[in-house]
Amino acid sequence: MLILALETSCDDTCCALLEAGRTGFRILSNVVSSQIKTHAPYGGVVPSLAAREHAKNIIPCLQEALKKSRSENIDLIALTIGPGLAPALLVGVSAAKALSYAWQKPLVGINHLEGHIAANFIGRNSKFYIPNSNDVQFQNYGQIQFPAICLVVSGGHTMLVLMRDYGHYQVLGQTRDDAAGECFDKVARILGLGYPGGPAIAEAAKFSMFYSQFSIELPRPMLKTQDYDFSFSGLKTAVLYQVKNQPYKTQQSKNYIQSMCVEVQQAVVDVLVTKTIKAVQEFQTKTVLLAGGVAANQHLRQTFKHRLNFFPNKVNLFLPAPQFCTDNALMIALAAYLRVRKRRELLFERYPWQRIKPDSNLCLSSWLNH
Ligand code: KG4
Ligand code: ZN
């Protein structure tokens, strides 16, 4: 089955072409057009500018993604329908609907977070798409054993999800205020590190505390609570007050900024890893999945590897490659394939993701045997 996918929920215009079968898949294209330069001066994503950029970039991205196939060979068009910035989403929805109408192909609307989770099926040893290469090989899906605990950590969401099977999502807890990525982005703005904050903080946090002239301590919000909820706005405020209480010269000093980044990253990682492991223990799961842009963070990945290594029972850790953690359309194509294959309505608890109804022109039955 050949799937064209579009993703425009935030500040990346993404198109991908995926050939997916029962046992494996081939990544024919995975195009991401970033808008970082547009939003950087504002320290965050401006929805109206994001929509304008998507409208400008969507056709070139589609042209690039479609180089490897003719439109008549496409079986399905997948698109992100939320959550995300409404004006940004609308560009992808309009483009996908126009293509669906022109080519008379079915549409599948995909939840953005389900897309992030589906990135785990790309597997560990992916042979990535090589531009202009004709040698794009088939690879197997990641073999995920359920039940699994999935930590979804992005710019807009932080949640722990119990998955008893693919398509079964029980949200155990989520952030009560800021998401982990949002916390990184806001702290980076306070420290003058620019946008997006996560990669900037991760880069600055490579600094060794051995050379630090400062002893900085930040809270680990909700680390010890019995539930699976998170809260990161207090952490951001703690950084703000600690910075404000320093003399201007210290605030601007590289050593101080780097030391602060080490501590912020450690505080976020401590909370995320501790709560995920608590859930693994309570629900006796065999697998941990990481999903969303913050899952690209090397310190988070290393800490998970380290902690799960010392776990009494073997727990498989899935870490999508960093380029598949941040927004992309390949994950949307994969989620569409898995959904069509499973023929299941999604089950969501405690969180108002829409139950996605197939579009009127989607005829599932004709795709099930592909
Ligand atoms: O999933 P994503 O690309 O977009 C949303 O769905 O929100 O996630 C973007 C978020 C941003 O907050 C960004 O700062 C964060 O992911 N991020 C990172 C890293 N790369 C991206 N955070 C920490 N370390 C990284 N390496
Ligand atoms: Zn995302």
Image (spheres, rainbow, N blue to C red):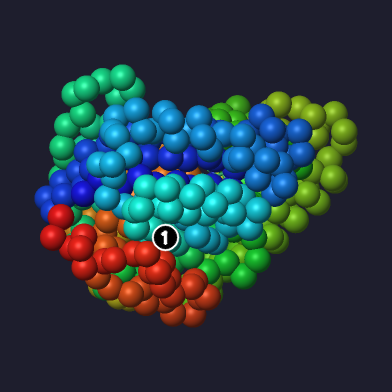
Q: Nearer the viewer, residue 343 or 191?
A: 343
The residue shown at (21%, 49%) is: 1
Q: Is residue 220 above or below residue 6?
A: below
Q: Say if residue 155 shows up in the picture.
A: no
Quarter of the image for the C terminus: give it.
Answer: bottom left
Q: In this rendering, would 195 be left or right of 143? A: right
- Where residue 174 appears, x then y in whole percent? 52, 69
- The answer to whether residue 92 is visible is yes
Instruction: Give the percent coordinates (x, y) of residue 5.
Output: 39, 47
Residue 68 point in image, percent of width and height? 29, 29
Q: Residue at x 87, y 36 (%)?
A: 247
Horizontal relation, residue 56 to residue 21: left or right: right
Q: Amino acid at mark 1?
A: Ile
Q: Position of residue 88 (x, y in %)?
A: 61, 50
- Among the 4 quarters of the image, the one containing residue 131: top left
Determine which residue is flagged by label 1. Answer: 110
Identify which residue, 255 or 282, lies in the foreground. 282
Left/right placement of residue 227 relative to residue 220 reads left
58 or 246, nearer to the observer: 58
Instruction: Identify the secondary structure beneath mark 1.
Output: strand
* Residue sitting at the far right: 248
Q: Is residue 10 above or below residue 128?
A: below
